[in-house]
Image (tube, grey):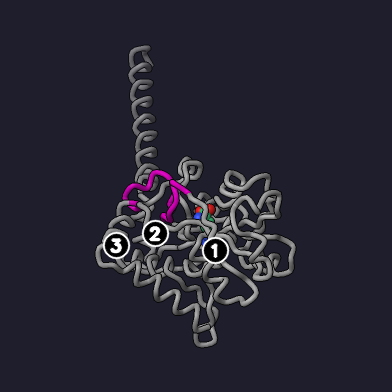
Amino acid sequence: MTKKVKSIFFVISLLVMTAIFFAGCSNANVNESKSALEKIKESGKIVLGTSPDYPPYEFEKEIDGKNTIVGFDIEIAKEIAKDLGVELEIKSMEFAGLLGSLKTNKIDFVMAGMTPDPERAKEVDFSTIYYNAEHGLVINKKDIDKYKEVSDLKGKIIGVQQGAIQEDIAKEQIESPQIKALGKVSDLMLELKTGKVDAVVVEQPVASSYVKNNDDLYLTNILFKDEEGGSAVAVNKGNEDLVEAINKTIERLIEENKIDEYVILANEMMSNE
Ligand code: ARG
Protein backbone atom coordinates (compact mmCIF):
# COMPACT_ATOMS: atom_id res chain seq x y z
CA MET A 1 0.00 0.00 0.00
CA THR A 2 1.29 3.40 -0.82
CA LYS A 3 1.59 5.99 1.87
CA LYS A 4 -1.25 7.96 0.26
CA VAL A 5 -3.67 5.00 0.29
CA LYS A 6 -2.71 4.28 3.92
CA SER A 7 -3.51 7.77 5.04
CA ILE A 8 -6.82 7.73 3.16
CA PHE A 9 -7.69 4.51 5.04
CA PHE A 10 -6.68 6.13 8.28
CA VAL A 11 -8.88 9.16 7.68
CA ILE A 12 -11.84 7.00 6.66
CA SER A 13 -11.60 4.76 9.72
CA LEU A 14 -11.28 7.84 11.89
CA LEU A 15 -14.46 9.22 10.36
CA VAL A 16 -16.31 5.93 10.83
CA MET A 17 -15.24 5.73 14.45
CA THR A 18 -16.30 9.29 15.11
CA ALA A 19 -19.67 8.59 13.50
CA ILE A 20 -20.16 5.48 15.66
CA PHE A 21 -19.14 7.41 18.76
CA PHE A 22 -21.65 10.19 18.13
CA ALA A 23 -24.39 7.76 17.22
CA GLY A 24 -23.86 6.08 20.58
CA CYS A 25 -23.98 9.41 22.37
CA SER A 26 -27.16 10.58 20.78
CA ASN A 27 -28.82 7.27 21.61
CA ALA A 28 -27.89 7.69 25.25
CA ASN A 29 -29.18 11.22 25.09
CA VAL A 30 -32.57 10.11 23.84
CA ASN A 31 -33.02 8.08 27.03
CA GLU A 32 -31.56 10.59 29.41
CA SER A 33 -33.42 13.47 27.92
CA LYS A 34 -36.72 11.86 28.83
CA SER A 35 -38.09 14.07 31.56
CA ALA A 36 -39.43 12.75 34.85
CA LEU A 37 -42.90 13.76 33.68
CA GLU A 38 -42.55 11.71 30.48
CA LYS A 39 -41.33 8.71 32.45
CA ILE A 40 -44.25 9.00 34.87
CA LYS A 41 -46.76 9.18 32.03
CA GLU A 42 -45.16 6.19 30.32
CA SER A 43 -45.23 4.07 33.49
CA GLY A 44 -48.85 5.04 34.16
CA LYS A 45 -48.23 5.86 37.82
CA ILE A 46 -46.77 8.52 40.06
CA VAL A 47 -45.27 7.62 43.43
CA LEU A 48 -45.91 9.88 46.40
CA GLY A 49 -43.73 9.84 49.50
CA THR A 50 -45.34 11.01 52.72
CA SER A 51 -45.11 10.76 56.50
CA PRO A 52 -48.61 10.00 57.79
CA ASP A 53 -48.17 11.21 61.36
CA TYR A 54 -49.46 14.69 60.60
CA PRO A 55 -53.26 14.96 60.75
CA PRO A 56 -55.07 16.63 59.03
CA TYR A 57 -52.31 16.77 56.36
CA GLU A 58 -51.81 13.00 56.27
CA PHE A 59 -52.63 10.26 58.73
CA GLU A 60 -53.62 6.61 58.89
CA LYS A 61 -57.20 5.51 59.23
CA GLU A 62 -58.83 2.13 59.12
CA ILE A 63 -61.27 2.09 56.22
CA ASP A 64 -63.22 -1.13 55.58
CA GLY A 65 -60.76 -3.00 57.78
CA LYS A 66 -57.80 -1.68 55.82
CA ASN A 67 -55.15 0.70 57.07
CA THR A 68 -55.38 3.64 54.66
CA ILE A 69 -53.42 6.87 54.33
CA VAL A 70 -55.77 9.84 54.16
CA GLY A 71 -55.66 13.60 54.67
CA PHE A 72 -55.80 16.79 52.62
CA ASP A 73 -52.31 16.31 51.16
CA ILE A 74 -53.48 12.94 49.88
CA GLU A 75 -56.60 14.45 48.29
CA ILE A 76 -54.40 17.00 46.49
CA ALA A 77 -51.98 14.23 45.41
CA LYS A 78 -54.93 12.29 43.97
CA GLU A 79 -55.90 15.33 41.90
CA ILE A 80 -52.32 15.74 40.66
CA ALA A 81 -52.31 12.09 39.54
CA LYS A 82 -55.76 12.49 37.97
CA ASP A 83 -54.71 15.55 35.97
CA LEU A 84 -51.65 13.65 34.74
CA GLY A 85 -53.85 10.70 33.82
CA VAL A 86 -51.90 8.23 35.99
CA GLU A 87 -52.42 6.08 39.09
CA LEU A 88 -51.28 7.32 42.49
CA GLU A 89 -49.08 5.03 44.58
CA ILE A 90 -48.32 6.09 48.16
CA LYS A 91 -45.15 5.21 50.07
CA SER A 92 -45.12 5.87 53.78
CA MET A 93 -41.91 6.74 55.61
CA GLU A 94 -40.48 8.92 58.35
CA PHE A 95 -40.38 12.61 57.54
CA ALA A 96 -36.57 12.81 57.80
CA GLY A 97 -36.19 10.19 55.06
CA LEU A 98 -38.42 11.81 52.45
CA LEU A 99 -35.95 14.00 50.57
CA GLY A 100 -33.35 11.20 50.48
CA SER A 101 -35.92 8.86 48.93
CA LEU A 102 -36.79 11.54 46.42
CA LYS A 103 -33.18 12.06 45.42
CA THR A 104 -32.61 8.32 44.96
CA ASN A 105 -35.77 8.14 42.81
CA LYS A 106 -37.67 5.82 45.15
CA ILE A 107 -40.52 8.31 44.97
CA ASP A 108 -41.53 10.91 42.36
CA PHE A 109 -42.81 13.63 44.68
CA VAL A 110 -43.19 14.55 48.32
CA MET A 111 -46.29 15.92 50.02
CA ALA A 112 -45.96 16.01 53.79
CA GLY A 113 -46.89 19.49 54.92
CA MET A 114 -43.36 20.27 53.81
CA THR A 115 -42.16 23.85 54.11
CA PRO A 116 -40.17 25.03 51.07
CA ASP A 117 -37.37 26.51 53.15
CA PRO A 118 -34.22 27.84 51.42
CA GLU A 119 -32.00 25.01 52.69
CA ARG A 120 -34.23 22.37 51.08
CA ALA A 121 -34.68 24.46 47.95
CA LYS A 122 -30.96 24.02 47.29
CA GLU A 123 -31.57 20.27 47.02
CA VAL A 124 -35.01 19.92 45.45
CA ASP A 125 -37.55 22.00 43.54
CA PHE A 126 -40.81 23.14 45.08
CA SER A 127 -44.27 23.88 43.72
CA THR A 128 -46.15 26.99 44.73
CA ILE A 129 -47.40 26.99 48.31
CA TYR A 130 -50.80 25.30 48.59
CA TYR A 131 -51.50 25.79 52.30
CA ASN A 132 -50.41 28.16 55.05
CA ALA A 133 -50.23 27.56 58.77
CA GLU A 134 -48.47 28.89 61.83
CA HIS A 135 -46.85 26.64 64.42
CA GLY A 136 -48.58 25.79 67.66
CA LEU A 137 -47.53 24.44 71.03
CA VAL A 138 -49.04 21.36 72.69
CA ILE A 139 -48.63 20.78 76.43
CA ASN A 140 -50.19 18.56 79.08
CA LYS A 141 -53.52 19.81 80.38
CA LYS A 142 -52.18 19.75 83.92
CA ASP A 143 -49.56 22.34 82.93
CA ILE A 144 -52.00 24.95 81.66
CA ASP A 145 -50.98 27.46 84.33
CA LYS A 146 -47.28 26.77 83.84
CA TYR A 147 -46.93 27.68 80.18
CA LYS A 148 -48.77 30.87 79.34
CA GLU A 149 -46.20 32.64 77.19
CA VAL A 150 -43.06 31.83 75.26
CA SER A 151 -40.82 33.03 78.11
CA ASP A 152 -42.28 30.29 80.37
CA LEU A 153 -40.62 27.73 78.10
CA LYS A 154 -37.10 28.89 78.93
CA GLY A 155 -34.80 25.86 79.38
CA LYS A 156 -37.66 23.37 78.97
CA ILE A 157 -37.58 20.11 77.01
CA ILE A 158 -39.17 20.87 73.66
CA GLY A 159 -40.23 18.01 71.38
CA VAL A 160 -39.84 18.45 67.63
CA GLN A 161 -39.91 16.12 64.66
CA GLN A 162 -36.56 14.98 63.27
CA GLY A 163 -35.62 16.86 60.13
CA ALA A 164 -38.50 19.32 60.51
CA ILE A 165 -38.18 23.09 60.56
CA GLN A 166 -39.74 23.22 64.03
CA GLU A 167 -36.31 22.47 65.49
CA ASP A 168 -34.93 25.77 64.17
CA ILE A 169 -38.11 27.59 65.10
CA ALA A 170 -37.84 26.33 68.69
CA LYS A 171 -34.15 27.22 68.88
CA GLU A 172 -34.77 30.71 67.50
CA GLN A 173 -37.93 31.62 69.39
CA ILE A 174 -37.51 29.87 72.77
CA GLU A 175 -34.73 30.76 75.20
CA SER A 176 -32.14 27.97 75.65
CA PRO A 177 -34.50 25.05 74.96
CA GLN A 178 -33.47 21.42 75.42
CA ILE A 179 -34.44 20.00 72.05
CA LYS A 180 -35.68 16.41 71.80
CA ALA A 181 -36.10 15.33 68.17
CA LEU A 182 -38.00 12.12 67.33
CA GLY A 183 -38.87 10.53 63.99
CA LYS A 184 -42.63 10.49 64.46
CA VAL A 185 -44.98 13.16 65.75
CA SER A 186 -47.18 10.44 67.30
CA ASP A 187 -44.19 9.36 69.44
CA LEU A 188 -43.59 12.96 70.46
CA MET A 189 -47.14 13.15 71.78
CA LEU A 190 -46.57 9.94 73.79
CA GLU A 191 -43.38 11.39 75.26
CA LEU A 192 -45.33 14.49 76.18
CA LYS A 193 -48.08 12.49 77.90
CA THR A 194 -45.51 10.50 79.88
CA GLY A 195 -43.70 13.68 80.93
CA LYS A 196 -40.49 13.02 78.99
CA VAL A 197 -40.90 16.28 77.10
CA ASP A 198 -42.55 19.45 78.37
CA ALA A 199 -44.07 20.72 75.15
CA VAL A 200 -44.26 19.87 71.44
CA VAL A 201 -44.04 22.32 68.51
CA VAL A 202 -45.92 21.31 65.33
CA GLU A 203 -48.00 23.10 62.70
CA GLN A 204 -51.07 24.53 64.41
CA PRO A 205 -53.71 22.38 62.62
CA VAL A 206 -51.72 19.28 63.65
CA ALA A 207 -51.47 20.47 67.24
CA SER A 208 -55.20 21.04 67.28
CA SER A 209 -55.91 17.62 65.83
CA TYR A 210 -53.81 15.71 68.40
CA VAL A 211 -55.38 17.69 71.22
CA LYS A 212 -58.90 16.87 69.98
CA ASN A 213 -58.09 13.18 70.18
CA ASN A 214 -56.28 13.28 73.55
CA ASP A 215 -58.08 14.51 76.63
CA ASP A 216 -54.81 14.92 78.57
CA LEU A 217 -53.34 17.33 76.05
CA TYR A 218 -53.88 21.05 75.65
CA LEU A 219 -53.31 23.49 72.80
CA THR A 220 -51.81 26.75 74.11
CA ASN A 221 -52.36 30.17 72.56
CA ILE A 222 -48.64 30.42 71.92
CA LEU A 223 -47.96 30.67 68.19
CA PHE A 224 -44.60 30.64 66.46
CA LYS A 225 -44.23 32.72 63.34
CA ASP A 226 -42.53 31.44 60.24
CA GLU A 227 -42.26 34.02 57.50
CA GLU A 228 -41.31 31.59 54.75
CA GLY A 229 -43.86 29.10 56.05
CA GLY A 230 -46.49 27.10 54.20
CA SER A 231 -46.60 23.73 52.48
CA ALA A 232 -45.40 22.91 48.99
CA VAL A 233 -44.84 19.82 46.84
CA ALA A 234 -41.19 18.74 46.40
CA VAL A 235 -39.77 17.11 43.25
CA ASN A 236 -36.24 16.45 42.07
CA LYS A 237 -34.29 19.37 40.66
CA GLY A 238 -34.52 20.08 36.96
CA ASN A 239 -38.06 18.76 36.42
CA GLU A 240 -39.64 22.00 35.27
CA ASP A 241 -42.38 20.24 33.34
CA LEU A 242 -43.45 18.22 36.39
CA VAL A 243 -43.44 21.31 38.64
CA GLU A 244 -45.46 23.15 36.02
CA ALA A 245 -48.05 20.36 35.83
CA ILE A 246 -48.31 20.20 39.64
CA ASN A 247 -48.67 23.98 39.87
CA LYS A 248 -51.48 23.84 37.35
CA THR A 249 -53.41 21.38 39.50
CA ILE A 250 -52.75 23.44 42.65
CA GLU A 251 -53.94 26.59 40.87
CA ARG A 252 -57.11 24.84 39.76
CA LEU A 253 -57.81 23.49 43.27
CA ILE A 254 -57.28 26.92 44.84
CA GLU A 255 -59.58 28.50 42.27
CA GLU A 256 -62.28 25.90 42.91
CA ASN A 257 -61.89 26.31 46.69
CA LYS A 258 -61.15 22.61 46.87
CA ILE A 259 -58.22 22.78 49.28
CA ASP A 260 -60.36 24.26 52.07
CA GLU A 261 -62.91 21.59 51.31
CA TYR A 262 -60.27 18.85 51.64
CA VAL A 263 -59.10 20.30 54.96
CA ILE A 264 -62.65 20.16 56.31
CA LEU A 265 -63.06 16.63 55.00
CA ALA A 266 -59.77 15.53 56.59
CA ASN A 267 -60.83 17.02 59.92
CA GLU A 268 -64.12 15.15 59.73
CA MET A 269 -62.35 11.89 58.92
CA MET A 270 -60.20 12.39 61.97
CA SER A 271 -63.00 13.00 64.38
CA ASN A 272 -65.13 10.02 63.40
CA GLU A 273 -62.34 7.55 64.13
N1 ARG B 1 -43.65 21.88 58.03
C1 ARG B 1 -42.62 21.21 58.75
C2 ARG B 1 -41.41 21.01 57.86
O1 ARG B 1 -41.50 21.10 56.67
C3 ARG B 1 -43.06 19.89 59.35
C4 ARG B 1 -43.72 18.94 58.42
C5 ARG B 1 -43.92 17.57 59.03
N2 ARG B 1 -44.71 16.72 58.20
C6 ARG B 1 -45.09 15.46 58.45
N3 ARG B 1 -45.84 14.86 57.59
N4 ARG B 1 -44.75 14.89 59.57
O2 ARG B 1 -40.33 20.75 58.32
Quarter of the view holding residue 184:
bottom right
Residue 191's place in the image compared with 155, above or below, is below
Residue 3's place in the image compared with 69, above or below, is above
Residue 51's mark?
Answer: 1
Q: Dot 1: what SS?
A: loop
Query: Magenta residues: mostly which secondary structure?
Result: loop
Q: Tell me if the residue at label 1 has its CB under 8 Å from ligand 1.
A: yes
Judge the density around disc 2: few (<14), some (14-19), many (≥20) Cα neighbours within 10 Å.
some
Specify the segment rendered in magenta. 226-243
Q: Mark 1 and mark 2: span between their CA atoms?
A: 17 Å
Instruction: Kindly identify the amino acid type of the residue bearing the numbered disc 1.
Output: Ser
Using residue 114 as the reference point, say whether residue 158 is left or right of it: right
Relative image position of residue 158 (x, y in whole percent)? 66, 55
Relative image position of residue 116 (x, y in whole percent)? 45, 49
**Residue under circle 2?**
131
Q: Dot 2: what SS?
A: loop
From this viewpoint, is residue 108 visible? Answer: no
